[in-house]
Amino acid sequence: MSERAILHSDLNCFFASVERVLNPEYEGKAIAVCGSTEDRHGIVLAKSELAKQAGVKTGMVIWQAKQLCPDLITVKPNYEYYSKFSSLVRDIYYRFTDLVEPFGLDECWLDVTNSHIFGSPYEIAEKIRTTIKSELGLTVSIGVSYNKVFAKLGSDMKKPDAITEISRENFRDKIWNLNVSNLLYVGRATTKRLNEHGIFTIGELALSPLSVIQKMLGVNGVQLWHYARGEDTSRVMHRDFVFPAKSLGHGITCNADLENEEEVWRVILQLSQDLGHRLRVHNLSASGVKLSVKSDDLKVRQYQAPLEIQTQSPFEIATAARRLFKSYEWEKKVRALSVTAIGLSPESKPFQIDLFADLERHDKQKSIDDAVYIIRNKFGDKSVRSASLLGNLKMPNDSERNSVLPGKMFE
């Protein structure tokens, strides 16, 4: 069996690069794509290479970015165009293989094991790089390897507009001296935990006893240990593959800070109305709820708990989220909230009932939800509303809300 050939392609400074293509006058200038200052999303979402060199970072407040780069040009995001360019780039990938797995708008894995007609894996990567540049005006960094984790690592190693190859023969020399945080799925908390045990590099992780890593990080640690040793065997999914949803959520940053539990409840209830509708559309029910709370000092606290019974009910989800919020200590006002339905399964699938669940109350609530859903489908979303939602909410309008979905928040 021939060695697998996996590419990971990462579009450089994607949002800012698209803005430069759409606006040629931005060529050679520092650009930052920023959220709206009016709605308190005034942070850098993406930056050009020149802005990056000046010290501008993703997540930085606009005024801080302009202190570092006085000539910085700030533009509002144009997600419709970013999505269009992302689709055009994938069309180029499809010329070489149909095994293309997206990882956000700007990144994809490609399995080119059986694409010999186009040349070696490195030659295919070079053709992709030059084609994207000539046809779309964008640059891309590509990692070439025999597994997905190392291909992703390769695309991160040299930017912009570059190709890095990591082979079975050279990966120890190329990556084992890198900080362990460079490894895919090793976040800040995991890095800190590993560092506390004297593990600072990918090589140190790979050479550690598996039993020690498993005791430290559980099943996830076992997976990371195999990744560090080049033993990732995960497949690149076909272009038409749709990942089953494990969670579905909805969140917003409020126009003004929430100051009491009643204001929080009204926002939770509104978010849960939208969430319940989406669960119905996808014929899913939830067995648990997660609540994320961002305070006005931008710290995020998360709480989650199982539900008594699997449900699509907006009210039952909202009530569970409200109970979770009781754990929040009011040291700071609340700036943002998100409610996520977790433990999803098809609505028709049988499930284990909690012995203490109030099934009669659940059935009554389901009848109410069914009636509301029918009325709203016929007469519009605002035809029936909870009394507690009448009046002004400290929420952006519908077009400004953020869906909470798996994947990267920023470029």
Image: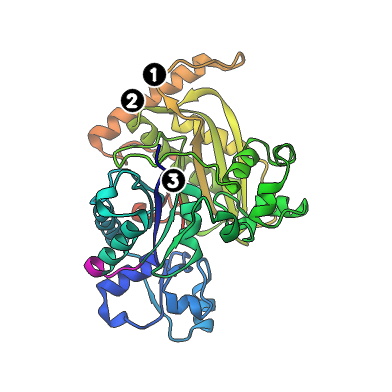
Q: Which residues are magenta?
A: 134-139
User: Pointer 1: residues within 10 angstroms few (<14), some, or many (20+)?
Assistant: few
From where the camera sits, is residue 149 visible? yes
Residue in the image at 25% along x and 72% along y:
22
Q: Amino acid at mark 1?
A: Ser
**Label 1: which residue?**
348
| Residue farthest to the right, as pictured | 197
Tell me, yes or no, whether the highlighted magenta stretch contains residue 78: no
**Label 3: which residue?**
405
Residue in the image at 66% along x and 53% along y:
203
Tell me, yes or no, whether the highlighted magenta stretch contains residue 137: yes
| 3 or 1: tag closer to the N-terminus | 1
Local SS, label 2: helix
Q: Amino acid at mark 3?
A: Leu
Local SS, label 3: loop
Disc number for residue 371: 2
Q: Amino acid at mark 2?
A: Ala
Mark 1 vs mark 2: give the one in front: 1
